[in-house]
Amino acid sequence: MMSNFDTIRSMRIQQGLKGFQLAERMQVSAARVSVLEKDEARGAVTLKLMEKTAKAMGCRFEYRIVPETPTVTDVNEKANTKPRYRVVVKPS
């Protein structure tokens, strides 16, 4: 079963790479790739190693923090935007 933290393994499989092939690209041992994937599943991989792994797979690594609820800025921006459509009601 895959966890929420299986990006490396999923991307490797999606690209048709075996663990040893990724290891060669990263210039590490195949055992290190196995440990890396397990570390990611535990949430224990470093950002630096994630970036190195992404580059080895021809990918870009992004690290972001995204608010779960709208921020005050988001609410204010939405309130200041003009609607795309205007409804005009004609008197009968």
Image (tube, rainbow, N blue to C red):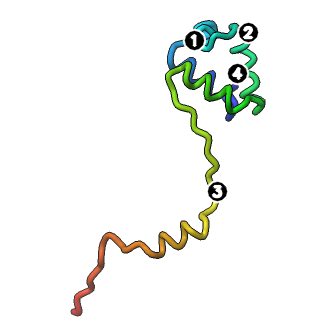
Q: What residue does disc 4 label?
A: 37
- As helix, strand or loop, the secondary structure at mark 1 comes to helix
User: Which residue bears the numbered disc 2?
Assistant: 31
Spatial separation of the CA atoms under disc 2 and disc 1: 14 Å
Classify 10 Å Cα crowding around label 1: few (below 14), some (14-19), many (20 and above).
few
Q: CA distance from mark 3 to mark 2?
A: 37 Å
**Element assignment for label 2:** helix
Front: mark 1 or 3 = 1
Horizontal side of 84 relative to 92 (left or right) equals right
Residue ID at (64%, 49%): 65
Q: Earlier in the sequence, mark 1 or mark 3?
A: 1
User: Of the residues shown, which amino acid type is indicated by label 3?
Assistant: Glu
**Contact flag, marks 4 and 1 (Cβ < 8 Å):** no
Q: CA distance from mark 1 to mark 3?
A: 36 Å
Mark 4 or mark 1, which is nearer to you? 1
Depth check, front residue: 45 or 85: 45
Q: Amino acid at mark 2?
A: Ala
Residue at (55%, 23%) from the top-left corner? 55
- Report which residue position mark 3 lands on: 68
Q: Are marks 2 and 4 in contact (CB under 8 Å)?
A: no
Q: Residue at image x 67%, y 35%?
A: 4
Residue 53 location (% of width, % of height): 61, 22
63 relative to 81, above or below: above
Q: Could you give the CA–CA distance between mark 2 and mark 4, rounded to whole angstroms?
A: 10 Å
- Name the N-terminal-most of marks 3 and 2: 2
Near mark 3 (Cα within 10 A), the count class, few <14, some 14-19 or many ≥20, is few
Mark 3: secondary structure: loop
- Which residue is pictured at 57% across the width and 12% down the height? 25
Front residue (pair 38, 50):
50
> Mark 3 against mark 2, which lies toward the viewer?
2
Label of residue 25 in the image: 1
